[in-house]
Image (cartoon, rainbow, N blue to C red):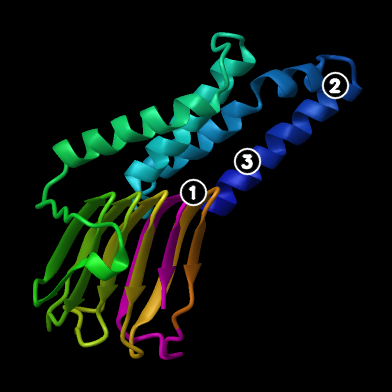
Amino acid sequence: MKGRYFVGILLILIGTGFLGDQLGYLDFGDIISTYWPVIIIIAGLAGLFDRGSSKLGSLIVISIGVIFQLSRLDMITRDVFKYFFPVILILIGGNLIFSKGAVSSKSGANSENWNKNRTNEDFVDHTVLMSGIENINTSQSFKGGKLTAIMGGIELDLRDANMEGTQCYIEATAIAGGVEIHVPRHWRVEAQGTPVLGAFTNKAVGPVDPTAPLLIVKGTAIMGGVEIN
């Protein structure tokens, strides 16, 4: 579901609810104060069924909505924020188990001790936990990849790479960490990120040519950041 359609439907439903409240058919103020987290859950579900969205990010958004909703229904009595980190770790662990691709994890979170390597792999798949990795990729038929940084950092340099075809995807997830992607100047970049107490920024200055190769970066930044430049 495209974002504008979701927002449009949501506004129609909220407007209908307030209209019903004014006509005396329901107490919409009380309903929205209790069930507002459902909006977050629906947004996550919309992303889950959108082929262009990050599935892990959508699951995290759904989980956040469920935790808030359980709190509003008094089914969770403790501070809801205490539940976020364990749930996120469970989702990431499941994503690593059931997704394809190798996992890279290097010791030493300090950037000076990052594992630095030069590769020409057509598809990159890096996951770091309390660590860091710097990858200079020179593939001449780059197909995309997956980057996950948890309390650590990943720096992917694609400035000497060339893309296979006209379009490819990178899924980037940063949780209390950071992902930085450097792209060639002749690539166009489209960012489809979901920041939660974090930042998902696109600083790349690409060409205006609509036929130029397109890199689509999608993912989630939770108390961390994803930056493309």
Give the amino acid type for the residue marked by disc 1 in the picture: Met
Tell me the residue that label 1 is attached to: 223
| 31 to 88, vertically: above or below | above
Which one is in front in this view, the residue at disc 1 or the one at disc 2?
1
User: Does dot 1 land on a helix, a strand or a loop?
Assistant: loop
Q: Residue at x 30, y 57 (%)?
A: 171
The disc at residue 200 is none
State the image quarter where residue 93 is shown. top left
Give the amino acid type for the residue marked by disc 2 in the picture: Asp
95, 35: nearer the viewer:
95
User: Does dot 2 land on a helix, a strand or a loop?
Assistant: helix
The disc at residue 9 is 3
Q: Report whether residue 49 is seen.
A: no
State the image quarter where residue 72 is shown. top right
Give the amino acid type for the residue marked by disc 3 in the picture: Ile
Q: Is residue 214 magenta?
A: yes
Q: Which residues are magenta?
A: 205-229
Percent across and percent down for residue 131 are 25, 55
176, 125: nearer the viewer:
176
